Image (cartoon, coloured by chain):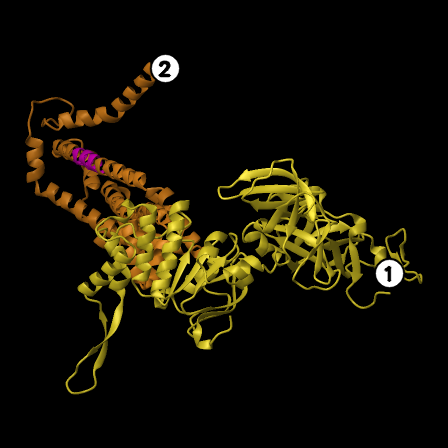
Chain colours: A orange, B yellow
Amino acid sequence: MRKFWGFCIIVVALVFVYLPIIVLAVYSFTESKSLIWSGFSIEPYLSLFSSSELINMLVNTAVLALLAAAIATILGTIGAIGIFYNKKILGKFTSAASRIPVINAEIVTAISLAFVFSFVFLRGTYFSLLIGHVVICVPFVVLSVLPKLKQMDSSLYEAALDLGATPTQALFKVVLPEILPGVISGFLLAITLSLDDYMVSAYNKPDGFETISTFVYKALAKPRNAALAELRALSSIIFVVMVIGVLIINFRSGSKYKKSKIKENRR
Amino acid sequence: MEKNKQDKIIELIDLTRKFEDGLIAVDGVNLYVRKGEFVTFLGPSGCGKTTTLRMIAGFDKPTSGKILLNGQDISALPPNKRPINTVFQRYALFPHLNVYDNIAFGLKLKRVRTAFESKGCKPVYKMKKLSKSEIAEKVGKVLKMVDLEGFEKRSVSTLSGGQQQRVAIARALVNEPEILLLDEPLGALDLKMRKDMQLELKEMHRKLGITFIYVTHDQEEALTMSDTIVVMKDGVIQQIGTPTDIYNEPKNAFVADFIGESNIFSGTYLGDKKVRFIGQAFDCVDEFEKNEKVDVVVRPEDVEITDAESGLVKGKIINSIFKGIHYEMTMKIGKTEIVIQDTVEKEVGETVGIRIKPDNIHIMAKEFSSNKYDGYITKKNTVCFGDGEFECDVCQLYDGSHLDDEGYLITADGEKIDLTDLDVKVEVGLKDIEITDDQEQGGAIGNIVSIIYKGDHYQLIVRTDENEEDFVFDTEDTWNVNDRVGVIIPKNKIKLSLVTEQKK
């Protein structure tokens, strides 16, 4: 009986999480502007890919996400290494300071960034938008790289020095390959954060520049917007891409886990 | 030991390393290592042997003192500039590289001074990388030496512990260092593999002729492999010598107890090459002052079992364990126990006699005959020393004195003295200290840091946290190292004396 109730709760939870998405996906195949089925059509998908406005917004979002994630990954990795090897006050302070943006409300980050940029007359430029995205991504890169550094055998770095490497060579030839999985997952995390972001984009973007999220907000503000069907199509595509991405990552880490298990057994 | 000055490849002068938390890991170590020597730093964990090695490698900077390599001070040189390579405790192989690339790591970074012909003039020297074929040749050679041919493309994580060990040794040796440092390299291997590797390392050392500095806490390993053993404790060198010297002529009870099995007794030197211990006078070869209290060391294999009548001392066998090539028996003589190793077993309960040859009795000066501290008297007429406060009899400071009702001391002449904050010397005998589990009951609190069995009693050292003051004493009770205890000293056992010459 307890098993039955447990099962019910899981079903209800799954319904709440996935039913809206499924409904959305189904309705992405009709041209209706509200929840009325007006016949099957792939028109929303076709117009999504023919509207230059929409294509432009997609490219904007992707380029911004890649750029911000790349910068955040470099800064975050350097930061994590600095924090790890600086056990003293400086390291502790940087570590604590880098965590604050994670728990800080995004609206606060967004408004304060806009405020600062308006002081230096940079508000509403591509530069301020990019910096804003980097700011929200960096702490997450630091958080995903630090554990890898902690797992690493600390004598590896010393071994590299011992064999004649300068500290810089040791960093690139030994430390970096060791923490690479953390760096990559930090990069991916940064991309999703940037794709998702609305607050920082809304307050810092140049006029006329739209990302997916700002576009969707704008579209929803006008109920009779012609792009509503296309947005359903776009959301469905994003969802499918994400699911495929998650499946690939799970599959790969699963097989890696098995491999490392085999290695452990052989030892 | 004294040899040519040129022979010294590495020399440590007053080397000290103090950590940020105040712990002194290495305390004024003076030592030199000759070219081609196999030197082992031996000691329990925390004795400073690994820290010393890390300073030679360059991973740790000495707080003070110098490290000379071929007469040049290298204390400030970074590890990558030193012609020294290390085999790490847990190998520290690079997991993302295969066996070949692990070994070639150092070679790929190396730059060699090569002469280039320039037109008509003197040759120009440039730093040049090793070519691929040179690297391949060197790696091949060293892989052959460690018996790992054909393993080049294997990932290091697929290798067994022993194989990883060999890769680690190959990776260090391929750079042709002047000195090879080995930090407990065999610690992670099983017994059989360890024994094989010991012999192999010894053989490698013989063939290559380079200097090996080896760190271990395994005394047997040290005895098997080394030319010279450096025994360390608490960051201080206890004894330097050949394995035979260290085993046969330990300098103090710590070395005797740490190296091999040993019986350690308290004894008295009677003069005329006779020493009395376990209730009997024995002939010996060492000479000390008459009636001096000494520590006597007898190795279990040096005790000869005889008939009950023909032995010098007789006792009862109370325990016998088969150890493969011999029996290890414990014999009780009065209250004292002595451990004997013999190939012939005696029945438990049998009464037998023992004899010990004069040159198998090793006599050492007693390290501690009493505990001495600097202390001061408090308002309450108690005494503070050794990170604690103890009740004492302050009247012993002045002959014929007594205390008045207010706690002032009245001397024999009727003079009134306030003793508060008076500096005194405190002496407490080895038999006058007790310890208790009830820490609050003791005058001082500390951890047991050492237990040495001396036949019929244990000699314990309790060390306090704050200033690392030691209380050395004898007890018959069984305690464990690291037990946290309170130290009790009876009021009448604390001997006080004035620091200045005022004593009347």
| Near-viewer residue (B167 or B241) | B241
Q: Which residue is mark 2?
A: A2
Give the foreground label among 1 and 2. 1
Give the magenta part as a residue range.
Answer: A238-249
Residue B449, percent from left and from top: 60, 49
Quadrant of the image occupied by residue B116:
bottom left
Residue A236 horizontal/vertical position (percent): 16, 32
Q: Is residue B448 above or below residue B495?
A: above
User: Residue B398 has which mark?
Assistant: 1
Q: Amino acid at mark 1?
A: Tyr
Residue B120's place in the image compared with A178, above or below, is: below
Dot 2 amino acid type:
Arg
Q: Is residue B318 visible?
A: yes
| Image position of B128 (left or right of B447) | left
Query: Residue under mark 2: which chain is it in?
Result: A
Q: How many marks?
A: 2
Q: CA distance from mark 1 to mark 2?
A: 85 Å
